[in-house]
């Protein structure tokens, strides 16, 4: 898939880049049509790179045996960059007040590549790379097409972190730690244990709203284990589960229904289930021949995609990925054939699921001229800067006169129109939007671009 975000400040790009070996762990398709997960080694010497790959495979196998990654595993590529450290291990200064003591966890200061260390923010288990500049440089030099980065720190002591990237050590719970941290980094989920008032903010699974009819996971209220539960550390903040029943609260349980939905919506934001289609450009139609149209779909496991075919906006067929126009079955004149794909997964009940994640291919055709145009909206949509503090620039290109609307969607589904639907002529467009006027707090939002009824969604991040 398109590179997600360099969530590291770009002026750090002056850090020296070094080229390392990149191993392919899983490859299901082209980089620009998949979500690319990239593991980075830290604290692994040249002699320990085979161990790094083994550690990655162990973590990754557990990840893709976790719902909903199991269902959508064909949407992902996975790679590992063999970053070589001069010395083995992760730094531990033993400065956090909750350190177990040097007799249990000795002080260490190895020359690892990214400076990954314990005791960050005075929390012993919080393990974070010390040099985001080097992380940024390694990604730029070795795999700039990444969507999610995971750093594996070579130590058997317990620790990890989430945020711009996910980090875990090689503790026996390494896979569970990393999967929990990916909940933060990839899906912007909150902890469902009380981590402190400094971490209290609106997230898909955390809110200050207590009304079950208004809470952002209202569609799941009444499902087993889902409700509106006050956090143990504050009666003003609420979560969907309690009692250690979600992986965002404790390790080993499954993700709760709300968290699973959040992952599914995130996956759909990055990848279209329509992998390819035939014909993909102009083609000859002959009234004496049958004409075949086909899509290749990225099907979840089990398949939850529903596909429908419309000839001149009249439904012709459903649940098939191939449609044939029989010879002599269409009259002279202009016609359209459209196929629409939606994911009817039971893992999501989001109100905006269908509006954000309905996918279309439209063929314009006639007997006289054949297939004259295939429309799959792409438009080279660009959003920058991302993350943004105040102003966001939206650029796009229209290949023909089109109806255009642009909306901003908040995490709780609120729709803010930025551009009301209007007709625009062929050409390139660039607009700057001052988003502070909407009182947006720091967090993840979605820009929904609608052209001629077709949508494309892109995530943006608002800084504090």
Image (cartoon, rainbow, N blue to C red):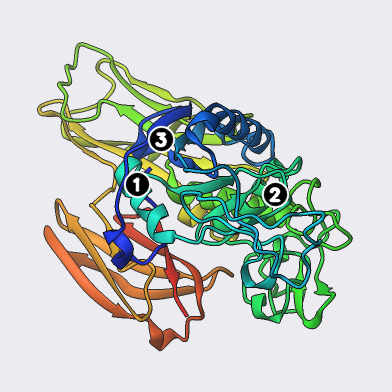
Give how far apart the Cα atoms at labels 1 and 2 are.
27 Å
Where 1 sits versus 427, above or below? Answer: above
For label 3, the SS is strand
In this rendering, position of residue 26 left or right of residue 334: right
- What residue sits right under mark 3 in the picture? 274
- What residue sits right under mark 1 in the picture? 2
Q: Nearer the viewer, residue 74 or 321?
A: 74
Residue 307: horizontal and vertical position, in percent?
Answer: 48, 34
Can you tell which of label 1 and label 2 is closer to the viewer?
Answer: 2
User: CB atoms at circles 1 and 2 under 8 Å apart?
Assistant: no
Looking at the image, tell me whether mark 3 or mark 1 is earlier in sequence order.
Answer: 1
Can you tell which of label 3 and label 1 is closer to the viewer?
Answer: 1
Residue 161: horizontal and vertical position, in percent?
Answer: 62, 58
For label 1, the SS is loop
Instruction: Classify the position of the N terminus by image quarter.
Output: top left
User: Which residue is located at x 61 percent, y 43 percent?
Assistant: 154
């Amino acid at each position: 898939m398109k590179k997600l975000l360099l969530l590291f400040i770009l002026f750090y790009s002056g850090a020296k880049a070094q080229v390392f070996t990149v191993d392919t762990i899983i490859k299901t398709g082209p980089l620009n049509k998949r979500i690319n997960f990239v593991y980075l080694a830290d604290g692994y010497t040249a002699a320990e790179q085979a161990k790094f790959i083994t550690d990655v495979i162990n973590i990754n196998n557990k990840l893709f045996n976790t719902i909903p990654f199991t269902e959508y595993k064909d949407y992902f590529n996975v790679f590992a960059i063999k970053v070589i450290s001069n010395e083995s291990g992760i730094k531990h200064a033993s400065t956090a007040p909750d350190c177990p003591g040097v007799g249990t966890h000795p002080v260490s200061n190895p020359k690892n590549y990214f400076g990954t260390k314990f005791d960050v923010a005075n929390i012993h288990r919080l393990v974070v790379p010390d040099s985001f500049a080097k992380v940024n440089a390694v990604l730029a030099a070795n795999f700039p097409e990444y969507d999610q980065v995971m750093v594996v720190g070579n130590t058997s002591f317990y620790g990890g972190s989430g945020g711009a990237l996910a980090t875990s050590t090689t503790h026996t719970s390494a896979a569970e730690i990393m999967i929990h941290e990916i909940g933060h980094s990839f899906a912007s989920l909150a902890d469902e244990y009380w981590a402190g008032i400094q971490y209290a903010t609106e997230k898909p699974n955390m809110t200050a709203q207590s009304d079950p009819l208004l809470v952002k996971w209202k569609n799941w209220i009444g499902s087993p284990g889902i409700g509106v539960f006050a956090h143990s550390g504050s009666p003003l903040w609420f979560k969907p589960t309690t009692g250690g029943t979600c992986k965002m609260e404790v390790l080993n349980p499954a993700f709760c229904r709300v968290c699973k939905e959040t992952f599914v919506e995130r996956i759909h934001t990055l990848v279209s289930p329509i992998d390819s289609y035939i014909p993909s450009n102009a083609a000859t139609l002959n009234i004496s021949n049958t004409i075949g149209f086909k899509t290749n779909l990225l099907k979840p496991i089990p398949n939850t995609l529903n596909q429908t075919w419309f000839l001149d906006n009249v439904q012709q067929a459903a649940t098939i990925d191939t449609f044939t126009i029989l010879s002599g079955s269409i009259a002279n004149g202009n016609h359209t054939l459209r196929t629409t794909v939606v994911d009817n997964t039971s893992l999501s009940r989001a109100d905006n699921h269908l509006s954000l994640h309905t996918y279309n291919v439209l063929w314009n055709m006639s007997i006289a001229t054949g297939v004259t145009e295939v429309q799959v909206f792409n438009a080279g949509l660009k959003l920058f800067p991302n993350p943004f503090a105040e102003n966001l620039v939206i650029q796009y290109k229209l290949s023909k006169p089109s109806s255009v609307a642009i909306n901003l969607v908040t995490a709780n589904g609120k729709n803010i129109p930025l551009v009301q639907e209007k007709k625009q002529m062929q050409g390139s467009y660039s607009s700057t939007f001052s988003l502070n006027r909407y009182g947006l707090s720091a967090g993840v939002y979605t820009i929904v671009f609608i052209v001629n009824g077709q949508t494309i969604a892109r995530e943006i991040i608002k800084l504090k």
